[in-house]
Amino acid sequence: MPLAHLAHLARIQRLAAILLLGFASGLPLALTGQAMQAWLTVDGVDIVTIGFLGLVGLPYTFKFLWAPLMDRFEPPWLGRRRGWLLLSQLALAALLFFMAGLSPQATPGFFAMIAVVVAFLSASQDVVVDAYRTDVLTDRSEHGLGASIHVFGYRLAMILSGGIALIWADQWDWPTVYRTMAAIMLGIAIACALLAPRIDAALKPPTSEAGQDLRGFLAMLLAVFAGYWIARSGLTLIGFDPASKNKWIELLFVLTEIAVALPLAAWAARKAKFETFNQSLTSYFSLPGAAAFLLLIVLYKLGDAFAGSLTTPFLIKGMGFAQAEVGIANKIIGIWLTIFGAFLGGLLMLRLKLYRALLVFGVLQLVSNFGFYALASLGKGAWGAVMVQPFDWGFVALKEAAALDWLLLTVIAGENISGGMGTVAFVGLLMALCNSRFSATHYALLSAFSAVGRIYVSPLAGVLSESLGWPVFFILSILLAMPGVIMVRLMRHSILALIQPARPTPETD
């Protein structure tokens, strides 16, 4: 077979693997996010508690702490990256099946703990998926296409776990839905092991003594627990009650604990000579404007994350839509529109390039939040409705006719198309910032900062939506979106520099 044909087939295999891994990455996210919120809402859990339970996603913001171990160690048999993929996916399948047997209302504490473990496994899978995508797409011209395909697979999974799951929940129940998702995750694990191509061994990071890395990781874990204890004790000492039922005081404890624990963990890693972690951070911070890029990553999707943090409870409890209506409009139609937005964004990036794409798509994300304000202000039925007749597609069915609100559909269209475009540009930015020798740690660090908005605003969103009402809540989301757009404009030259040829990797052996 001619070499050109072989290269073409290899490219198809790479992109097919990225599609499958994007699906694997997106499936468990909704099961500790929007789908879980729907389960909690129909189970009678109050809105503020649902907001605080958004913190089960904390592992997504801490994953850079254990990502160096995934750069440093390689499980046997399947090679670099693929061994970690199989382990995390099999564990996810098992935990989702176990979670299906729990009741969020009867045992909320234990339910939340298992949800945190599921989020930890999902975040660990994301570390490997993101690193794999960065490693396998060695040609930077493929980054935009690879990002689009990843978002396509990711959003397909969210149609299933975040949209079709709500329709299934109306027909069956949530435990059955979660058992079904566990079976799907098991199938994905098998497919990834068989289809994903191996990564070039030359991309391994510099070797360090394995025992030293493990000791460094344990030192970081101890520092996290110490930071938690220091923050909690300090607030108690100055008069705050950790057992208070005041939601603002609970929020203060959570945010202070995180703010103290993270810097302490970084200090412990340096003192304990966790070399893979230290070298990867040194490599990233050698990039001009590295700290500014971290701030940009936090701010770019902040308004979008704030508006979307409680979308499902807003639509079900705040606006009075049925689960099936939300599943069809927000999760199925909406996510298909996100996929359309992702492909449109990928195509536009061929012309706009990274800087212009970030700026234009960021403005569109900001404008789309006005739609939620209009929906909250005008109310359900302001523009009339279109009837969706019962259907049966075998794997999903609608038993009764549903009236889909025109205003809701318009809002969902604007938010999801602009969000999909913004996500493609954002993923392109993260990939451009990664060094291939430390891609797991670099991407984990960057995406952890990107999850700050999605995770940390959730408890604040729950308190604010209850205190101020939904219209003011969505005005705040618009204001929070502005700094990210301004930051892109201010960092124009630094972003343009990222599309230049890759900087040489310094020898550290």
Image (cartoon, rainbow, N blue to C red):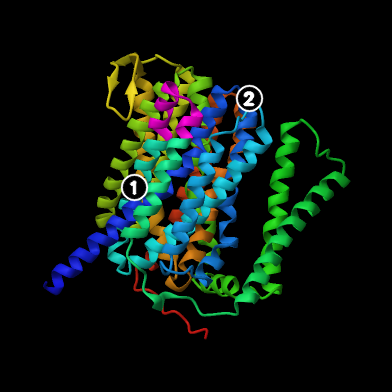
Give the mark nearest the N terminus, 2 or 1: 2
SS label for mark 1? helix
Counting the numbered discs, the total is 2
Real-space CA distance between mark 2 and mark 1, rounded to the nearest whole angstrom: 33 Å
Q: Residue at x 47, y 61 (%)?
A: 84
Q: Along the horizontal axis of the image, is 258 left or right of 339?
A: right
Instruction: Specify the principal SS of the magenta part.
Output: helix
Where in the figure is residue 125, as x and y percent of width and height?
Answer: 48, 55
- Where are the magenta residues, as a range? 162-178
Q: Amino acid at mark 2?
A: Asp
Where in the figure is residue 324, as x and y percent of width and height?
Answer: 40, 22
Q: Along the horizontal axis of the image, is 236 left or right of 261?
A: right
Q: Along the horizontal axis of the image, is 112 left or right of 244?
A: left
Vertical relation: 509 (above or below) 316 = below
Residue hosting label 1: 153
In the drawing, what numbered circle is on residue 89?
none
Where in the figure is residue 19, as x and y percent of width and height?
Answer: 32, 52
SS label for mark 2? loop
